[in-house]
Image: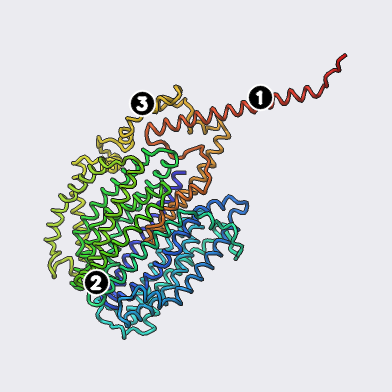
Amino acid sequence: MAQGIARASALLASGTMVSRVLGFVKAIVIAQTIGVIGVSADAFAGANQLPSNIYSIISVGLLNAVIVPQVVKAARHEDGGQLYVNRLVTLAMVLLGGLTILATVGAPIIGALYGASLSSEQLGLLVAFAYWCMPQIFFYGMYAVLGEILNARGLFGPFAWAPVINNVVGIAGLLLFSSIFGADPTGTGRNIDSWDPTMIAMLGGTATLGVAMQTIVLLFFWRRAGLRFGLDFQFRGTGLGQVGKLAGWTLGMLLVMQLAGLVETIVAYLASGENASIAAMQNAFLIFALPHAVVAVSIATAFFTRMSAAISDGRPKDFIRDLSEGSRLIGMFLLFSGFGLALVAVPFARIFATTDAGINSIAAILIAFLVGLIPFSGLFIVQRAFYALEDTKTVFFVFLFTVPLHIFGMALAAIGPVEFIVVGLALMQSIMSTLRLAILLVILRKRMGQLDFANITRSYVRFTVAAIAASIPALIVMVLLGTFQEDGFPRSGIFQALISCAIGAGTMALFYFPLLWVLKSPEFRGFAGPLLARFGVKTGGPSSAARRDDEDGELDADILATFPDTVAVSGNDAAPTPWNLASEDVEPDIAEERRQAEEQEEREERVNAASWAFGGATEDLSTAGIILPMHSRTTEIPKVGRTEPPRTRRERREEERRAVIELAARREEEARLAREARNSADDDDGRGSPPRPKE
């Protein structure tokens, strides 16, 4: 089973990574086609972002919250979920179709709302692009629905790799546009009047065509999943009534975030024209979000599952330990990424921009974002900690009460020098991420009684010392390359910029990770130890399991006192445990229950992993956290047969104790039933020969 999950996860991860690489290529081609600074670039960037804003407000949280638990449950029906799937797809088509029509017709109103600070001419160009981009709402929504259904049926590849087709179609459309109408990498070669309907249709239409192809390709795998689609408008029983408060509070948080995003867009458009605005900000954020998406989201996925299981099993100390370990692992990689990206900000910016003004603007925006990289990713995993506690209400109110401060900060950026407006917006996001993280940590500590701040602080001090020390030689190398000179090597072309990025990051890594080893970082040694062991290198450092045993050592005496003598010693294979209890020689019925539990858990974990991959692929990193707690709450899973082996002596003893209690209860019940059966048989024998009458 574990191998199946690993294969599915690898397939999802590989598709997501290829899609992200092509996404970068697409962003580069867009920059080479219409530039990153200028009215054309900002109008297209804003119009192409509108469908994502509307879709995330109304659909993402609701669809994910419904699809994940309900599709898996429907697979237990006699028809294999065929009826439910038809109703769900029909309902999605109706709702998304209606929403898309309303958004397309209302494009002038929506465009005017987000482009309130634009001139009438540039607003007209934005609305013209929006007419062609709004249909993406329907296709993004259907991609989510169809993809989740295929995942639930065991087909993971199409969902993971479909975004690749989107990027390929988009890149092809941009290249065709450049070949017909010419490229404008500086963003100054076209004014608003030079855009005719054919140019607008080709640029906006190919963007939507890519999203449409991403969705349509999933239909080719429908029959392979054992499904036959037919419209069914009987919507009762679709599970919408079971979404509950979790999805509601998350949807509310999305609305709050979109309110801040609306103000941010309006303020950013104040700089549109000759200064960095929406397009430059999107490109800088694309670079900034890369380590977050690859590192923080991946690590949070694994630890979110653990934290949810710990809370479900009543193990608060394991919850705290997992949150601490996940936070430290994220910090180890992201401090390296943050310092490294800051060092190569200029060559990275050169990949997208061609002018010195554009390069300097994107680099400055990127560094302002990077100030808050650790809080941004820390906020992500702490939000998942609250979701593991099935508490989305607290997160909602923290975001709600801090939005006025965020808006005030963006207003301050608006009244500053126009060339620094977007830099101020990026810096304000970093400040707000830090503030929200601090508030949530205070609330979480108060709720749990304690958090592992001591270990986290020690680890982050090690990471920071190593990062600062490794940055010095890397900075020297970047200076020697001419990074800060207008005619320097990193600024002379895209290829030279890529080489400079590789040299700077490589130099940073060459010093950072060995320094962590010298500083005896348990996180890095636990991560690198198994890799080095494969090459015959003995590290001598404690394994992660051993570290967890040490952390839980103080609990052993108390837990041992509660165990029966027969299972007090860990490793006693003769003692009944969930694993040897599942042996068919001992308890065939328990073995069958365990087998069914394994199959169900594998199916559910695959679907959850796919949902996280969807969040990463679409850059929607705000809603995936509601999936697992809702899923585990709405899907009944047999408790016999835990598939993940215990990670500590404490967990093993808890499992052994549970197994003994369950076995004793089962045997007692069997003995009671046997006694009742014997008594019933004796009664029947007595009634078979009626008593003799008294004489």
Percent position (x, y) of residue 476? 12, 57
Crowd class of label 1 (few under 14; some 14 to 19; many from 20; radius 10 Å) = few
| Point 57% across, 33% down: residue | 588
**In this orientation, which residue lies closer to the viewer: 163 or 136?**
136
Say whether disc 1 or disc 3 marks the residue closer to the N-terminus: 3
Residue type at mark 1: give it: Arg
> Where is mark 1, residue-wise?
675
**What quarter of the picture does the C terminus occupy?**
top right
Residue 15 seen: no
Say whether disc 2 or disc 1 marks the residue closer to the N-terminus: 2
> Where is mark 3, residue-wise?
557
Query: What secondary structure is found at the residue carrying circle 3?
Result: helix
Percent position (x, y) of residue 514? 20, 45
**In this orientation, which residue lies closer to the viewer: 308 or 282?**
308
Side of 209 where 115 appears, left or right:
left
Establish if 557 lies above or below 646. above
> Where is mark 2, residue-wise?
276
Percent position (x, y) of residue 372? 25, 57
